[in-house]
Each structure stands twice: as structure tokens, then as C-alpha cells.
Amino acid sequence: MGASPFLIGLFGSIPSLASALQILPLLFAHRLNSRKQLIVPLMWIARTGIATFALFPILKGGLFLSYAMYMYIQIAGAISSPLWQSWMADLVPKHSIGSYFGLRNFVLGVVQIPAMFIAGIVLDALGENTKGFSVLFLLAGLAGFLNGYLLKIQHEPVYRIRESSIGPVTSFKLLMHNKQFKNLMLSFAIWYFAVGFGSVYINVMLLKEIQFSYLQVSILNAVAMFIGTLFQPFWGKAGDKYGFQNFLKMCIWVQAFLILFWGLTPKSFLYVFFLQIFIGIFVTAGSSQLIFYTLMYIAPADLRTEAFSIFNSFSNIALTLGSLISGIIVSSLPNFGFKVFYLNVTSIRLTMFISFCLRILAAYTMSKADLGSARKVPFFELVRESFTTAIIPWMRSWTNIWRKSK
């Protein structure tokens, strides 16, 4: 649709900007009879509304409408998110958080990986143009409509409401007295700023600078998803048994160095392929999920909705600021570039190198933070145990299901 690199960066920052509004449910959550009564209509409209992107390229002002609809989708998700997380915290027993979400995310990966391949095939067959993308958005909108219905019939435990809202400011003060929550939130405010600074333009770099096709990018993203799917039970069960905190810190250190390797990416499909394997293990299955598990575990039971709202709001404000500043740098230096050996250091790669320095600072800060006690265990013992008790049995069960269906 002709968006400039700055507008692409701005578009990429919309999810984190909208997620900063997760603090809003604190103002009205006490008035709800159930969480479902707000979540279902917001998300049903949002997920079905994805289909409207099929029309925007042929409409006057379509780019503006795209931003407006995408903003609504993200705001709906932001307002629903802390209520949904509170809903899940009531639904899933605390002693099996990791095991349950490990299985849940494994199933999601089994569904998402074929969908990513299909998307790449559709774009290659119909063309990377309005026609190809419109077909994808129409299919996504239909799936979103069905998804809204399934959310509507999902069971919700009794919602324990207060007589009145304690408000964001009071909630913040109360949560700041919880040392572990305070450490987690402040550490991740620095971390998310660093992540937002360097991650917005990864796909742009692969498409424009490395010149991969959409199918190649889909395959590479599917690799991370597939490996992440295999390792979901690994981190989930390990966290349930030994505590999530040490594993989270380890994954954050690995993720800090991964952005450096993105910045050094050559024109090699194989290089990015192996990079995506590490991302699948330590980011998709690792830090991305361990943050959520750790928060569920340390959030005070009587302030769960407030804890999710405040943590997500502050984290996403930091993520948005990082994305916007990196967007300003990229747009301000359109002709920036110099050669170092095989590498042409562009403004996009420059933001990744800056992000690496910021991530190292954040990882160091987090490694010193008290996020609760966790049992120490030799890493290789953990790998062996998790594969034999979690990953291999799940792979066998899915193989048996496939054989029976065949």
C-alpha cells in the first residue's frame, strides 16, 4: 500500500502502544458480573474485523483505515488481556500452570505452523499483491468469527468482584510493596525498551535487504514456531518442578545475544534457519512464555487483574518508546550505510546493534533481581528429564493420533 519505512515501524509499534492501555480495566472491572461479558464482544468484533483488510487497498484513504482498524484490534486485545489472564489464573490450578500452558501452546503451534506455510504458498501462487493478501485476510476473518463463538462458550469460573475499584494508583502502590513483583516489573521495563528498539524491522530487513521471498520468510518463521512448539512442554514442566525464575533469566541472556546475530545476518537462508532454531527454543518457547508463567506465579491472588494490567501497561509503554525511537532513527538516516567485511551496516542494522547493548544492560539488571526462590538443578539433567517425561511422550501421542486418523 506504499507505506514508508517509518510508517511500517509505526504500524509495528501499534500493538505495544495499545497494550499500554491494559491499565484501563482497573477502572471498571469491579462493575462486571463476569469477565466474559466484556471479552467476548470486544474480541469477536476484532477477530472477525481482520477480514476488512481485504478491502482497504481499493478504498480511498485505505492506509488510514488500516491503521484505525488495526488500532481497534489491538486496543480490544489490550483491554481484554488482563481480564483473560485473570480468567485463566482462576481456571488453571497453580501447581500445573506450566504443564497446562505448555500443552496449550504445543497445540497452538501444531495449528499455526501449517497456517504459516499455507499463507506463504497462497502469496506465491496469487502474487505478493492485493489479490494474494486479500484472500489471506478473508480466510483469517472467517476463522476469527469462529474463534469468537468458541470463546463465548468457554467455561468461566465464578468472578469474585469487589464493591468498588481500588484504582490504578492505589493498585500500583499496593503491588510495589510486593518485592518480587516490583523487581519483575522494573527489570522488564528496561528489557522491553531494548526489545522494541531492535525487533520491529527484522522482517523488513529479510524482505528488502536480504531479499527473501514471502514463502521463505514464512518457512523461517515456521521453523521458530515448530521448534518452540516442541519445547513448550520442556519449559512448562521444568518451571512447575524447579521454579520459573532461573530459566527466565537464562533465556533472557540468550535472547539478548540473538539480536546481535540478527544484525550480522548475511544473505544466507541457512544462517537464518539455524538462528530461528535458537529463537524457537529460547524465545518462542522460553522467555516469551516464562515471563507469563512467572507473573502468574508471583502475582498476589487478590490483585491478579491489577498485577497483569500494570505489568503489561508499563512493559508495553517501554516497548512502544523503543519502537518509535528506532523508527525515527531509520527514517532520519535513509542513506546511512558503510561496509564492514561482507556486511553493509544500514540504519536498520544499526538499531539492532544499539538494541544489543541495551539488552545486555537489561539482562544484567534482571540477573541480579530477586524474582523468588527456585530450586537449582544441573541443566543437562533438566534437559534429559524434560525430554523423557514431556517432549517425547507428547510427540508419541500426536503420532498415534495421526496414525489413527489415517
Image: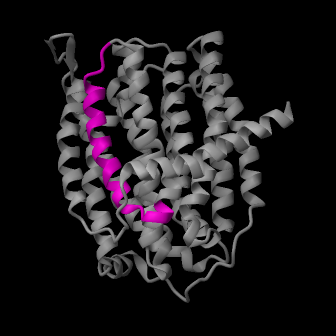
Q: Residue at x 60, y 40 (%)?
A: 109
Tell whether 284 sits left or right of 89.
left
Judged by its main secondary structure, the magenta piece is helix
Q: Which residues are magenta?
A: 239-266
Q: Which x, y percent locates residue 308?
A: 45, 66
Q: Which x, y percent locates residue 263?
A: 26, 26
Q: Is residue 242 magenta?
A: yes
Q: Residue at x 74, y 44 (%)?
A: 145
Q: Residue at x 53, y 74 (%)?
A: 28
Q: Residue furthest bottom?
A: 163
Pick the residue in front: 401 or 270: 401
Q: Which x, y percent locates residue 81?
A: 53, 59
Q: Residue at x 32, y 64 (%)?
A: 185
User: Residue 139 lies in what quarter of the image?
Assistant: top right
Q: Quadrant of the C terminus?
A: top right
Give the vertical position of 297 relative to 352 (above or below): below
Give the vertical position of 8 relative to 305 (above or below): above
User: Residue 177 lies in what quarter of the image?
Assistant: bottom left
Q: Is residue 387 magenta?
A: no
